[in-house]
Amino acid sequence: MVRAWVTTTRSGGKIGFAVVRDGTGYLQAVVAKQEVPEAVWERFRSLTQETSVALTGVVRIDARAPGGVELSATDVTILGESKDFPITPKEHGTTFLFEHRHLWLRSRRQVAIMRVRHEVVQAIRDFFYERDFVLVDTPLLTGSIGESAGTLFETDYFDLGKAYLAQTGQLYLEAAAAALGRVYCFGPTFRAEKSKTRRHLTEFWMVEPEVAWYTSEDNMRLQEAFVSYIVERCLERRKSDLEVLERDVTPLERVTPPFHRLSYTDAVTKLQSQGSDVQWGSDLGADDETRLAQEFDRPIFVYNYPREAKAFYMKENPDDPRTVLCNDCLAPEGYGEIIGGSQREDDHDRLLARIREEGFPEETYRWYLDLRRYGTFVHSGFGLGVERTVAWICGIPHIREAIAFPRQMHRLYP
Ligand code: ATP
Ligand code: MG
C-alpha cells in the first residue's frame, strides 16, 4: 500500500493513469477497468490534483514510467479530497504563487529547491564538524547592535527597555572563540531591510564561523574551502534536483580553490575604467559586484574595503589605515555577495574609539571590550547567507524561493 498525493491523472476508456507523490518521489499508478470492481474504477477516475489516497496493488519494473516502476492498482481509497486545487500546471503570477506558498511548496521545482537547501545546510554542519569547530548558539534577542542601526527590529523587553532581534551572532561568537578556539553559529538573523531587491529578506539564515589566531588571509582560505565543499556536495548528492531545476552545472563544477583575489582599491579602478561611477570610499553596489564577478569563472574575493564602508569591529589595516582587513566573497553568474568576513579589531583603544565614533552606547559594548581587556587575540570570521547560496546553486533569480516561508517587507502571509 502506498499513501500519497495525486499529481496528475489521465484516463482513456479502459485504462487510467495517475502520477502520485509521497514526498520522497513520484510513482505512476495504473488501473485497468476490466481488472478491478466498477467502484474502484470510478473512484480512480474521480481523482483530482492533490487528493490524498491509499493505493493497493503490485509494483512492476517499467522503464517508461517516471521513477522506473509502475504500480498496478487493485484498490484505491480516497483519504482526503481536493477540489479545485489553486495551483494548476498552467502559468501563475508570482504574487499568486506566494499567496499560496503553503500549497506551492508541493510542486516539483519547489521540492527540488528545498532538497538542495537541505543539502547545503547539512554540508555546512559536516564541514565544521569535520574540522573540529564547536557549534555555539548565540542569542536572537540582544541588547547590542551588530551591523547597522537602520535595519534593527526592536521589541519591548520587560523593565529593561528595548531588545533587538539579532542581525548577526558574531560579537557573541568572538567571546566563544576565546573559550573554544574554533566555533560557529548557525541560525536565523533579522534585518529590517526596506529594500526590495532579489537578494534581501528580512529573516534569513546565516552561518558564522569565528577562529582564534586566524588572520584575514587565513579567513579567505577557509572561505574558499567552505564554499567549494558546499557546492561539491550538492553536485554529488543533488544532481537530480539540479536537473529538475534545469541548472547548468558546468559553472558549479569550476568552483574550486583558489578563488581570485582583488583589492577594493583595484576593484574600484577597474570598475571606473569600465564606466562605473563608483567612488573610492563607498561600498560596492549590486551592479558593480555583478560586473566584477562576471570576468571570472569562479567566486572572487574583494578585500580591504574603506573603513567607512564597513562595520566598526573590523581591524584597521596597518599598511593602509584608510582601509580595514576584510573581504566579501562574490558568487559568479550575477549572484553577488554571498559572504562578508573580516579580521576583528583586537586593540582595545582602537575599538573603543570606533564605538565612540559611531555614537554607539558604550555601556552596551562593555562585555565586548572585555574581550580585548583580558587576553586579546588575533581572530577572524565570516558570515555566509544560506538563501543567497542556495539561490546561486539552484540558479534561481530571487532568494525568496530559497526558503520555505520567506519574510519580506511586504509579506507576512502565509
Ligand atoms: P548587502 O550589502 O548585500 O546587504 P551585507 O553587507 O549587509 O550584504 P553582511 O552583513 O556581510 O551582508 O552579511 C553576511 C551575509 O549575509 C551576506 O554576504 C549575505 O550572504 C547575507 N545577507 C545579508 N543581508 C541579507 C538579507 N537581507 N537577506 C538575505 N541574506 C542576507
Ligand atoms: Mg545589508
Image (tube, grey):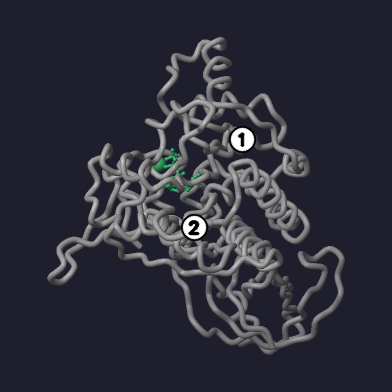
Q: Earlier in the sequence, mark 2 or mark 1?
A: 1
- The residue lying at 63 percent from left, 59 percent from top is 120
Please say if the residues under marks 2 and 1 sit with CB atoms less than 8 Å apart.
no
Q: Mark 1 Cα within 10 Å, few/some/many (few <14, many 20+)?
A: many
Q: Mark 2 Cα within 10 Å, few/some/many (few <14, many 20+)?
A: many
Marker disc for residue 403: 2
* SS for callout 2: loop
- The residue lying at 18 percent from left, 61 percent from top is 162
Q: Is mark 1 within 8 Å of ligand 1?
A: no
In this rendered view, identify the residue nearer to me: 411 or 183.
183
In this rendered view, identify the residue nearer to me: 118 or 259.
259
Quadrant where the N terminus sits is bottom right
- The residue lying at 75 percent from left, 86 percent from top is 57
Q: Amino acid at mark 2?
A: Ile
- Residue 104's spot in the image, x, y percent? 49, 60
- Residue 150's spot in the image, x, y percent? 27, 43
- Residue 394's spot in the image, x, y percent? 63, 49
Q: Decide if residue 112 is on the left or right side of residue 318.
A: right
Q: Is residue 83 above or below residue 227?
A: below
- The residue lying at 54 percent from left, 78 percent from top is 52
Q: Decide if residue 34 is on the left or right side of residue 45.
A: right
- Residue 301 visible to an observer of this rendering: yes
- Which residue is the site of mark 1? 301
Q: Is residue 45 above or below residue 107?
A: below
Q: Amino acid at mark 1?
A: Phe
The Cα–Cα distance between marks 2 and 1, rounded to whole angstroms, is 26 Å
